[in-house]
Amino acid sequence: MAELLAPLDMAMSEEPEAIETHARNGDGQAQLAMAIIEEHGLQGRTPDRTSAVQWRQRAQENRRFMPITQYTAAFNSQPSRVNIINVPVQSISAAQWQAVDKCVALLSSVVVKDPEACGGVDETRKRRVAWVQAAQR
């Protein structure tokens, strides 16, 4: 669960300037972290819905390429070949989007409805403390 919630943990614990540098350099995890910071006004930032939407959009559009090697065997006296195919892959999976959104919804509300949303009761408690601290900076 910690890996899925890495952008949220980043948003609550790291300096926004460092996160923004990574986000501007194309890091999808940092872009989602910036969206969380801007939307909720964490780390001493004033909430900025427009900026949050822009960061979220950049994170959604962020793709990297995964090289796949394909071997073509010799056929009809032709030599065998190795081809490399670059397949685009989302920087943030659908499961990660859902996990982060669910945990943020839990942390930003007063009522705890599903403590499993942030990784169990103990993890939720720790993240709630980090959320409050990040919101008060």
Image (spheres, rainbow, N blue to C red):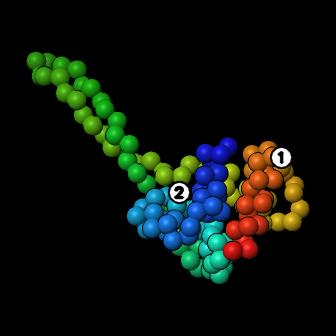
- Coordinates of residue 124 in the picture (x, y in percent): 79, 52
Q: Residue at x 45, y 68 (%)?
A: 21
- Coordinates of residue 11 in the picture (x, y in percent): 62, 63
Vertical relation: 65 (above or below) 49 = above
Vertical relation: 75 (above or below) 106 = above
Quarter where residue 37 is shown: bottom right
Give the residue type that dot 1 points to: Val
According to the picture, the residue beneath numbered tag 2 turns out to be 29
Q: Quadrant of the C terminus?
A: bottom right
Q: Is residue 58 left or right of residue 122?
A: left
Q: Quadrant of the N terminus?
A: top right
Q: Earlier in the sequence, mark 1 or mark 2?
A: 2
Label 1 CA crowd tier, 10 Å (few <14, some 14–19, many 20+): few
Question: Secondary structure under badge 1?
Answer: helix
Vertical relation: 8 (above or below) 77 = below
Q: Which residue is more in the foreground, 31 or 10?
A: 10
According to the picture, the residue beneath numbered tag 1 turns out to be 121
- Coordinates of residue 92 in the picture (x, y in percent): 54, 52
- Coordinates of residue 5 in the picture (x, y in percent): 64, 51
Distance between mark 1 and mark 2 Cα atoms: 24 Å
Q: Residue at x 89, y 62 (%)?
A: 111
